[in-house]
Amino acid sequence: MKILVRLPNWLGDMVMSTGFLQALRTVYPGAEVDVIVKKGLESLIDFMPGINHHYIFSRDEWKGLTGVYRFGRKIRQEKKYDLFFCLPDSFSSACMAWATGVAERIGFKKELRSLLLTRSFTRPASLHRAEEYISLLQQFSNKNITAQPVVLKAKTTAIANRIIINFNSEAVSRRMPVDKAASVLTALIKQLPGKEIVCIGSMKEKEHIDAILKKINDPAVVVNKSGKTGSLPELIELIASGSAMLTTDSGPAHIGNALGVPVVVLFGAGNEKNTAPYNKEPLTVLRLGQLPCEPCVKNTCIYGLPKCLELLDENKIVQSVQKFVAL
């Protein structure tokens, strides 16, 4: 049995798909599982168990639907597969599946995708994203499948009393505002003396972290790693070194959770019932839960800066982190 899986396009969703890949192994033991991954995320494959081979899809190289089709045809010429599982719900991903010529092409229903898939299923409501992926396999195979944990494997071990901090997110509505972030950092430094606090962020997020550190009295007590983790593997290994992690809802939150790092995740926009880090332990999810607009899924907030993050209780945040550091 040869199976090809089109992985999701976002970092957090790709991490959440690891449970699906593990479930795939239980339903088809001994199968050869290959994946298609978006360019820029391919290095995550090295931390995902159970993958034989991967194809890298670049939108810049394979432009438009024509490029997607040609990419699928290229795979068809290289290898024959028995099953194609299409985890993204875009039309282009279904077009790619169709172009590969795989006899069984499985995915969720949306718009005209069913014309290109041989088996399409309704995405179940009120499930976590990780369980949505597994439900696709369950509906296709007609087998009851136990929910699988989300798992990444790293070589680094945790360093005692190191707290990894991530105040960033792609969406402004999920990013911790500068003043609030500085206030939270100040409270952490004051109430958790002697802890090593490490702020992370990509190069484009460095300006945000720099602005936060300028607001605290003694920025030297914080290790600023924003813009210094030049690759995704470096970021993963740095997160794995934490004995605890405080983070906004973001890709790094899912990485920490999948690595087994105790994570406190602060929710602004987004529905935690659908997209929070999946493994329940060790995990704490904090949401304000006092505004009529919560939870929303907007990338920009009606208040400008996300009030649902600005009004979070700093003492509650610190206590949640302290609980994990003291383990």
Image (spheres, grey):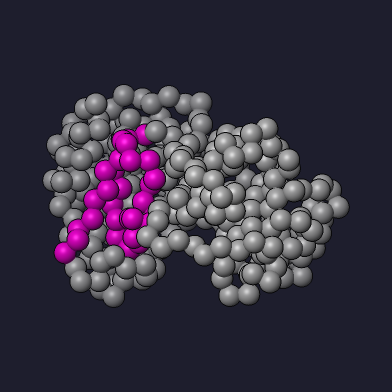
Report the residue at 15% width, 52% height from top. Answer: 313
Describe residue 172's horizontal placement relative to residue 4 as left or right.
left
User: Magenta part of the protein: which range?
Assistant: 261-290
Residue 284 colored magenta? Answer: yes
Count of residue discs: 0
Residue most extreme to the front: 142
Where, quadrant-wise, is the N terminus in this rendering?
top right
Report which quarter residue 172 is drawn in: bottom left
Report the residue at 48% width, 36% height from top. Answer: 151
Residue 132 colored magenta? Answer: no
Above-or-below relation of 23 to 177: above
Residue nearest the observer in this picture, 302 or 76: 76
Above-or-below relation of 150 to 39: above
Describe residue 157's horizontal placement relative to residue 184 as left or right.
right
Residue nearest the observer in this picture, 52 or 45: 52
Residue nearest the observer in this picture, 189 or 40: 40
* Image coords of residue 216 (percent x, y): 22, 48
Above-or-below relation of 115 to 34: below
Report the residue at 20% width, 34% height from top. Answer: 322
Describe residue 36's horizontal placement relative to residue 74 as left or right.
left
Describe residue 308's horizontal placement relative to residue 234 as left or right.
left
> Is residue 56 visible to us here?
no
Where, quadrant-wise, is the C terminus in this rendering?
top left
> Is residue 204 visible to us here?
yes
Report the residue at 40% width, 30% height from top. Answer: 241
Residue nearest the observer in this picture, 152 or 106: 106
* Image coords of residue 2 (percent x, y): 73, 42
Residue most extreme to the right: 77
* Image coords of residue 195 (percent x, y): 25, 30
* Image coords of residue 104 (percent x, y): 71, 56
Above-or-below relation of 323 to 116: above
